[in-house]
Image (cartoon, grey):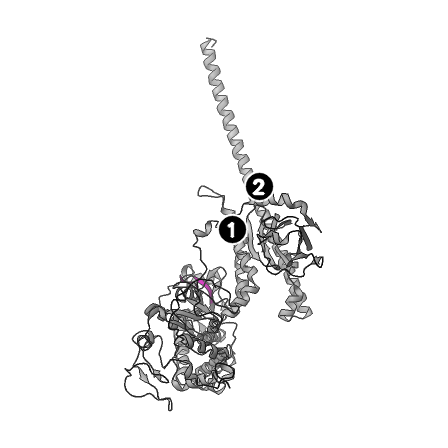
């Protein structure tokens, strides 16, 4: 992965340059640094490379005496993910957050439920610093290792010859502990790498296992034009030379029309046998490499930096001395969160760029299923709303069982979109350990260092400001609702509405606004609908059109015009507030039955542009299971007609379940209200009785004293 420069990023600011090259970008001035440095490893193809490693490792285990039946297992790329931890005591795969709280727990290929997790881990918590028991799986090479360990546990669980124990398996007088199994897997991984078996297989089919990108020479050439570039790898020179020749094997040079050049010419310094993370500490002896034979020359190198020379070993301090730089003048790019990013950041203070190849898939899922996160956030807001009128003096204990079940269901659905172990970076609304390490130690992160090709080298990377929990309670962009309502009343006579039935059914709406004066205010429309609780509401194919005076018709598209959408529930609480373009869609889930207000207004404050014209807004409204676009789902997932029908039936069943949950919720609220009313009536009756008794006693005493005063008794 790679690296580039000093003052172009701020420490402890996290960023992500993605495939669209727009996220986390901001403008600003930046001091131009004299040096730019690139450390680059190789990008292997996934899952082909993990499958190769898995087959080599499982073959080696069988050759050591493990059962032949293990060869029946095949690599499943949807199961493992990076950032997991192996519990060598209980043989579990754990996904945890930064504090050690367990998010997901799997024993073999079986996922443990909450009660089962509590039996082995009190409070669903582990001590992450217990490195003798827990082993972190952070690198891409760990994916095959993770799956192999799960296969071993799964095999011994299903094998009738072995009896499962708390810490392993027994077969007669033999005992196979989870720790021994883990050590065998570790030894197998080391053997596959150290023996050269994996490298030999890789070099035998480079096209299958190594990704080749023609943009790489272009990026390195541009970086060398403004600074210096170095390569540091743990591989030996022979393997590095073969890989790099393949990566730079083009008939032309870095520019089209130029002659082919050696891969050495793209780097100012080349270092092999780095032995990271030892490289960032005391390091090893710095020696020269004979590029003809690939052997090391005797003696320690102590001279200055030389061109066309390959070095072996050394340390990060030696690299800084040879290049004449230090600290933040280097941006170091790597794909190992511990061996590359954490060590270079903590020991050297280098700028860091973490390459996360999974980020492309993470972004795709996040884009396609963002409605699930919105639903999860709305559920959290709904829980907070239930408790907002209660304090420490309240005896009422609201039943949120159904809401908690819904939160778990949405979280599980989100995880399954990423893979069997869920997302690399989150579990529902909680971030994983890998995500917290990324945010702490990586100044930049992206799916590929090639993204740097789309930024000027003087670019200032800054992360968007993140609010702390106490700061998020303050409304930083308040809106005057009374002004919005008065503006609506003044302009309602200019809004034409068609298809006015706004109950919870499908409908298509068209709004036209006719502006006869140049007023500097936003165009605004308000749509009110009565929606039941826990129903998904989607406005599909949202589109705005401007009136063209010349053609006397509405333009097919309105580039540059944005619409801000705000949705409020019956309590006038905002459940959706977002800026959209002139076309798009938006989705929200209702949690309170009643009238919901959907307010749409333009982001333009220059209404004079539209003077004397019209603006039309199209809304295609879908509610409940009708919000799903089944033809699009069928085309995307390649479903047959029968499979699509089953999918529709499942969605309808889910909708019925939501209706039932809502009815149970209403019944529970009604029961609570009835019990509260009965209790209040009872106490009121008791209070009235006490008052009557006290009044009677007082009257009797008063009459007695009156008669005694008149001497009538």
Going by the image, does 393 lie left or right of 505? left
> Residue at image x 62%, y 69%?
636
Of residues 538 and 27, the one nearer the viewer is 27
Q: In the image, which disc is placed on residue 674?
A: 2
Q: Is residue 100 magenta?
A: yes
Say how many tags the image has.
2
Of residues 275 and 404, the one nearer the viewer is 275
Q: Is mark 2 on a helix, strand or loop?
A: helix
Quickly name the residue at label 1.
383
Label 2 vs label 1: CA separation?
Answer: 22 Å
231 relative to 106, above or below:
below
Going by the image, does 193 lie left or right of 396? left
Which residue, as the protein is rendered here, is positioned at the far front?
A: 550
Of residues 605 and 51, the one nearer the viewer is 605
427 relative to 481, above or below:
below
Q: Which of marks 2 and 1 is nearer the N terminus?
A: 1
User: Which quadrant, please, contains the N terminus?
Assistant: bottom left
Magenta-highlighted residues: 96-105
Q: Can residue 379 be seen in this view?
A: yes
Quadrant of res 245: bottom left
């Amino acid at each position: 992965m790679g690296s580039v420069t000093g003052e172009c990023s701020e420490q402890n600011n996290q960023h992500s340059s993605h495939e669209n090259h727009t996220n986390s970008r901001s403008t600003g001035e930046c001091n131009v640094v004299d040096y730019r440095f690139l450390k680059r490893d190789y990008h292997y193809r996934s899952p082909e490379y993990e499958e190769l490693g898995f087959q080599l490792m499982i073959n080696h285990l069988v050759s050591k005496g493990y059962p032949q039946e293990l060869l029946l297992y095949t690599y499943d790329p949807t199961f493992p993910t990076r950032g997991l931890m192996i519990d060598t005591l209980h043989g579990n795969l754990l996904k945890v957050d930064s504090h050690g709280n367990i998010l997901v727990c799997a024993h073999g290929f079986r996922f443990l439920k909450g009660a089962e997790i509590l039996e082995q881990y009190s409070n669903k918590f582990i001590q992450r610093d217990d490195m003798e028991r827990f082993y972190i799986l952070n690198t891409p090479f760990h994916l095959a290792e993770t799956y192999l360990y799960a296969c071993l546990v799964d095999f011994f669980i299903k094998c009738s010859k072995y009896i499962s124990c708390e810490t392993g398996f027994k077969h007669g007088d033999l005992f196979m502990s989870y720790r021994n199994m883990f050590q065998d897997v570790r030894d197998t991984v080391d053997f596959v790498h150290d023996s050269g078996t994996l490298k030999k297989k890789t070099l035998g089919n480079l096209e299958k296992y190594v990704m080749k990108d023609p943009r790489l020479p272009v990026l390195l050439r541009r970086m060398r034009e403004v600074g210096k570039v170095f390569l540091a790898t743990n591989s030996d020179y022979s393997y590095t030379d073969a890989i790099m020749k393949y990566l730079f094997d083009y008939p032309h040079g870095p520019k089209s029309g130029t002659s082919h050049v050696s891969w050495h010419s793209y780097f100012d310094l080349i270092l092999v046998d780095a032995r990271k993370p030892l490289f960032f500490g005391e390091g090893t002896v710095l020696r020269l490499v004979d590029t003809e034979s690939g052997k090391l020359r005797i003696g320690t190198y102590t001279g200055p930096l030389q061109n066309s020379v390959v070095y072996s070993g050394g340390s990060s301090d030696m690299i800084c001395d040879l290049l004449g730089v230090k600290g933040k003048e280097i941006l170091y790019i790597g794909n190992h969160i511990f061996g590359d990013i954490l060590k270079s950041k903590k020991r050297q203070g280098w700028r860091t760029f973490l390459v996360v190849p999974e980020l492309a898939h993470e972004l795709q899922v996040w884009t396609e299923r963002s409605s699930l996160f919105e639903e999860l956030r709305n559920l959290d807001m709904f829980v907070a709303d239930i408790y907002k009128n209660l304090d420490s003096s309240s005896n009422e204990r609201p039943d949120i069982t159904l809401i908690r079940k819904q939160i778990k269901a949405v979280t599980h659905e989100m995880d399954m979109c990423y893979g069997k172990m869920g997302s690399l970076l989150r579990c529902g609304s909680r971030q994983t350990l890998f995500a917290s390490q990324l945010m702490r130690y990586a100044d930049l992160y992206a799916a590929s260092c090639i993204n740097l090709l789309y930024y000027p080298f003087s670019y200032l990377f800054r992360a968007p400001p993140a609010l702390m929990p106490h700061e998020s309670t303050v409304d930083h962009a308040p809106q005057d609702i009374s002004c919005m309502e008065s503006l609506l009343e003044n302009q309602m006579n200019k809004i034409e509405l068609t298809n006015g039935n706004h109950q919870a059914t499908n409908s298509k709406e068209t709004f036209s606004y006719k502006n006869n004066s140049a007023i500097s205010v936003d165009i605004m429309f308000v749509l009110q609908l009565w929606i039941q609780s826990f129903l998904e509401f989607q406005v599909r194919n949202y589109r705005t059109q401007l009136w063209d005076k010349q053609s006397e018709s509405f333009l097919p598209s309105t580039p540059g015009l944005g619409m801000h959408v705000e949705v409020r529930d019956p309590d006038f609480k905002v459940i959706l507030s977002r800026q959209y373009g002139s076309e798009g869609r938006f989705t929200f889930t209702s949690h309170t039955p009643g009238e919901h207000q959907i307010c749409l207004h333009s982001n333009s404050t220059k209404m004079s542009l539209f003077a004397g014209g019209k603006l039309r807004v199209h809304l295609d409204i879908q509610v409940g299971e009708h919000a799903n676009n089944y033809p699009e789902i069928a085309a995307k997932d390649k479903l047959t007609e029968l499979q699509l029908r089953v999918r529709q039936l499942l969605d309808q069943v889910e909708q019925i379940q939501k209706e039932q949950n809502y009815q149970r919720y209403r019944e529970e609220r009604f029961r609570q209200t009835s019990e509260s009313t009965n209790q209040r009536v009872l106490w009121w009756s008791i209070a009235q009785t006490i008052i009557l008794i006290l009044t009677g006693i007082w009257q009797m005493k008063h009459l007695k004293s009156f008669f005694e005063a008149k001497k009538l008794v």
